Amino acid sequence: MSTSAGDGGEVARLWGIVTHIVTPTTLVAAIMMYFGAVRANTMYAQFGVDQSMLGLSFQDYVLRSVTLAVEPLVLVLVVVLIAPPVHAWLTRAAGRHRTAAMWGLAVAAAVGAAGTVTGLLGLAGWAVLPRYFLPLCLGAGIIILVYAESLYGRLNGHTTPATRGVVRRAACGALLLLLLLWSVTEYAQQKGWEAAVAYRADTGMLPSTVVYAARRLFLEGPGITETTLPDQNAMFRYRYTGLRLLIHSNQRYFLLPACWATSPWARAIALPADGSLRLEFHVLKMAPPECPPGQ
């Protein structure tokens, strides 16, 4: 019982130190910002727009990650919250039911070893795993192995030097954070790529845009049509249709040709968000534009 109490106290102290260094709110905000940045950069790169041109802020990245990052974050926070009480309960139960605990630890060690080996094989390129599953598999395997070995040592009276225990816990914590960062990166890149593929398959998901200009802009691209307006005294003489709004950021409108997916040479267009142009937008689902055949 004293060992269990000591273990629970060590976990509580370690958790207290961690929460003082990195508060849950800070951690959640940092993960959401990082997720949003990786997803946005991956998606816009598919359209030829570098992230340095967008000038997105911290709030922009966080807002763009809310819908996709909430569920994984809730899962991570639930695991973090229930880990200390589950650890204390397992320690007490193992002390009361030694035989069952030993069998359970053997099974856990086998599962941990399988997860670790699978993750290492995927890391070496010898096994095909989903990109964001690889770090989860590797991390879960290592953590289960380390935890099973630690609990086995307690049940058999093996004492671990205090310094070694602190180093092990610190290494496990650092490993968890790195694997979490790796998982977030892979998941965000996957979601960014999926969003770009969805826009490519259906440009109607983006707002249709009409650009009016005082002078010819010579906008070119599959699906773009230039019309010269008849009134010579009009403020804007040229109208461009067949455009889709990708994003408005950094005092610029980033547009795509409505039929950009039909040509590998289609380019994103950046126009200044000032009084020199007039832009009109609508999001009504209309008949798709008559696009030229793919080249």
Image (cartoon, rainbow, N blue to C red):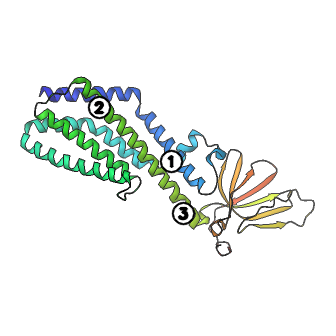
For the point 48% across and 50% down, which residue is it? 188
Mark 1 Cα shell of 10 Å, populated few (<14), some (14-19), many (≥20): many
Q: Is residue 223 above or below residue 71?
A: below
Residue at label 2?
Answer: 169
Q: Nearer the viewer, mark 3 or mark 1?
A: 3
For the point 36% across and 43% down, which residue is it? 76
Horizontal and vertical percent for residue 175?
35, 38
Label annotation for residue 8 = none
Horizontal and vertical percent for residue 114?
25, 52
First in sequence, mark 2 or 1: give its number: 1
Left or right of residue 96: residue 140 = right
Distance from label 3 to label 2 (Cα)? 43 Å
**Mark 3 belongs to which amino acid?**
Ala
Label annotation for residue 198 = 3
For the residue pair 212 and 265, the one nearer the viewer reads as 265
Which residue is outermost to the top? 162
**Secondary structure beneath disc 3?**
helix
Q: Is residue 261 above or below residue 73?
A: below
Horizontal and vertical percent for residue 82?
28, 39
Left or right of residue 28: residue 196 = right
Q: Nearer the viewer, mark 2 or mark 1?
A: 2
Horizontal and vertical percent for residue 88?
20, 34
**Which image quadrant for residue 182?**
top left
Mark 3 Cα shell of 10 Å, populated few (<14), some (14-19), many (≥20): few
**Mark 1 belongs to which amino acid?**
Ser
**Mark 2 belongs to which amino acid?**
Arg
First in sequence, mark 3 or 2: give its number: 2
Q: Is residue 289 above or below residue 26?
A: below
For the residue pair 266 and 119, the one nearer the viewer reads as 119
For the point 28% across and 48% down, which residue is it? 116
Is the residue under label 1 in contact with that under label 2 (CB below 8 Å)?
Answer: no
